[in-house]
Amino acid sequence: MLIILLGAQGTGKGTVAGILSKQNNWVQLSTGDIFRENIAKGTELGVEADKYISKGCLVPDEITVSMVEKRLEELKNEKGIILDGFPRTLSQAEKLDEILANKGEKVDWVINLETPREEIITRMLNRRVCSNQACKATYNLVLHPSKVEGICDICGSELIRRADDSDSSAIEKRLEIYDKETKP
Ligand code: ADP
Ligand code: ZN
């Protein structure tokens, strides 16, 4: 079972993917999370990806597609995979179809989440994430605050703001890129 979650930033793809994967024992494959893990560990992929992510740009397709292809291969025995944050360009979507076709597979479901733009910006400014890479829980100061301010309910680690959520010009840039590259 392969499911794709589409939607602009801040619509809740990661949250919905997390709920679905827990309920069904599916694996969540989030390209944003993989990039952030690599940035935190300082890997070669992380250093390269950070050049784009810190500016609010998309990571080039070659890097992203080969990373997803490798991860899909590692997950080939899983009964369900939810893609969250991929594909994000027409070319990524076409490459994904090719990768799957080569294995005799296809996309089963696509879920498109929609949220009004003003709400998205507020959500991104209010988003806080767990600093523990193994946990990565997401909170919202208004919609879904942690029980103790600044502390993760699940693991007790400090909650932080994602670097690309902290700067409103990066947020606007990301939404512009969504309109131009992803929405089609
Ligand atoms: P958001 O959807 O809020 O931007 P993500 O965690 O999905 O957050 O992604 C964070 C960043 O990682 C993106 O702004 C982009 O730079 C990069 N990224 C994630 N997925 C992709 C992708 N499929 N193609 C290119 N870049 C990506
Ligand atoms: Zn946590």
Image (cartoon, rainbow, N blue to C red):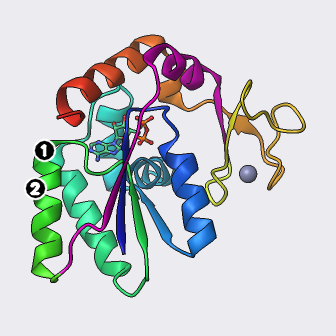
Asked whether 4 or 74 is in front, the reply is: 4
**Vertical position of residue 84 compared to residue 10: above or below:** below
* Residue depicted at x 24% and y 53%: 64
Residue type pointed to by label 2: Glu
Q: Which mark is residue 164?
A: none
**Vertical position of residue 169 compared to residue 49: above or below:** above
Outermost residue, right side: 148
Name the quadrant of the C terminus.
Answer: top left
Q: CA distance from mark 2 to mark 1?
A: 6 Å
User: Picture quarter containing residue 138?
Assistant: top right
Outermost residue, bottom side: 77
Residue type pointed to by label 1: Leu
Please tell me whether mark 2 sits on a helix, a strand or a loop. helix
Number of other residues with Cα within 10 Å of mark 1, as a class: few under 14, some 14 to 19, many 20 or more: few
Q: Name the side, left or right, on which 30 lies relative to 147.
A: left
Q: Which residues are magenta?
A: 105-130
Q: Position of residue 163 (x, y in %)?
A: 52, 29
* Residue depicted at x 30% and y 51%: 86
Is the CB atom of the residue marked by disc 1 within 8 angstroms of ligand 1's nearest atom?
Answer: no
Q: Which mark is residue 90?
A: 1
Asked whether 91 or 130 is in front, the reply is: 91
Q: Name the side, left or right, on which 127 lies relative to 113.
A: right
Q: Position of residue 49 (x, y in %)?
A: 31, 43
User: Picture quarter containing residue 57?
Assistant: top left
* Residue depicted at x 18% and y 73%: 100
Q: Is residue 127 magenta?
A: yes
Query: Which residue lies under the disc numbered 2?
Result: 94
Callout 2 touching callout 1 (CB < 8 Å): yes
Number of other residues with Cα within 10 Å of mark 2, as a class: few under 14, some 14 to 19, many 20 or more: few
**Vertical position of residue 15 compared to residue 100: above or below:** above
Asked whether 58 or 118 is in front, the reply is: 118
